[in-house]
Amino acid sequence: MQKRLPPLGWLRTFEAASRHLSFTGAARDLNMTQSAVSQQVKSLERYLGQPLFVRRPRALELTEAGITYLPVVREAFRTLVRGTQAVTGAQQNAVQVQSNITFAVNWLAPRLPRFRATHPDVQLNIFTELWEPREMAEGAAVEIRFSLRPADTVRTELLRADHYYPVCAPDYPVELEDLQRQPLFDCSNLLSNWESWVEDQGLNWTNPQITYSTTYLVSMSVAMAGGGLCLVHDTIARNLIDQGRLIAPFNHRAEMPEAYYLLLSPQAEETPGAVAFANWVRAEIRADSAI
């Protein structure tokens, strides 16, 4: 008697665990507990009659059976995606995009009319986060992430490395010599911060008072209101500087350890809308860098 196929949920869990080589990473992706992921993988292994992973103390490793089975499972999911798109028609051009909120507001939103003009058939669903997720969000086809180099659990490519520098309102009076006595604002938990900029500039500071927020949007809003200075980088600030809402009072720019990366889900290349959006983002970033 022919054996029935295992439950689709078990296969989905196996694919996520294989992509992360971690039950914890798969749990984040699938919005499940780590123990539930582990149990579903064990159930699949019992069903197949052989182990798919070697459990190491800090990571997983695929067995020979797992290595053989993984491309079969991924191709099956790709076939399901293509078949679903063929049935739903327009849904193949619905794309879930994720980025941090500052990038979405200051870079993406002002450019969306251009994307709409060239791709009127693509429906974007934009989801924003205050902090970059550790792994690509469940359901996202395309993610623009600002961080150190992400783990290669999905297709990742460098979009843009940037430089950071202080900005303030156009009429805000400030000199480099008295900068540390000014109200200073920044986004928290970044390596590209006031301390590293000051060190790169060669200044000698003694514990300046800095107000931190969880997003650049807050610190930039304070600076535009004339409340002090904040650190920015070109990707999020160029439009505001071009509009005259912010100025960079000093010439020095420091190279950022963080950068912008484009992440594509395994299904993105099977979705015409996702391919169109990713190509458009690449072209826009290239155009920005050429200025």
Image (spheres, rainbow, N blue to C red):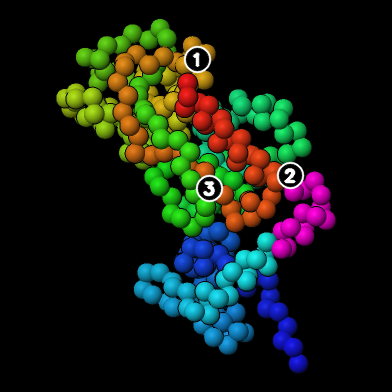
Q: Main secondary structure of the magenta part?
A: helix
Determine the residue positioned at 38% across, 19% down: 167
Question: Quick one: SS at disc 1?
Answer: helix
Depth check, mark 1 against mark 2: the one in front is 2
The residue at the point 77 percent across, 37 percent down is 121
What residue span does the magenta drawing correspond to? 79-92
Q: Is residue 125 visible?
A: no
Q: Which residue is mark 2?
A: 93
What kind of residue is marked 1? Asp
User: For the point 73% across and 39% down, which residue is it?
Assistant: 122
Q: Position of residue 67 (x, y in %)?
A: 52, 74
In the rendered view, tell whether residue 30 sits above or below residue 44.
Answer: above
Is residue 109 shown left or right of residue 132?
right
Q: How much space separates mark 3 and mark 1, taking CA atoms?
A: 29 Å
Disc 1: which residue = 242
The tally of labels here is: 3
Classify 180 as above or below 155. Answer: above
| Position in image of residue 207 (x %, y %) | 21, 29
Q: Is residue 84 magenta?
A: yes
Alpha carbon distance from label 1 to label 2:
33 Å
Label 3: state its secondary structure.
strand
Q: Quadrant of residue 50?
A: bottom right
Q: Dot 2: what SS?
A: helix
Q: Is residue 78 magenta?
A: no
| Residue type indicated by callout 2 | Asn
The quadrant in which residue 41 appears is bottom right
Which residue is tagged 3? Answer: 263
Q: Residues within 10 Å of mark 2 (few under 14, many from 20)?
A: many
Q: Are marks 2 and 3 in contact (CB under 8 Å)?
A: no
**Is 89 situated left or right of 117 in this image?**
right
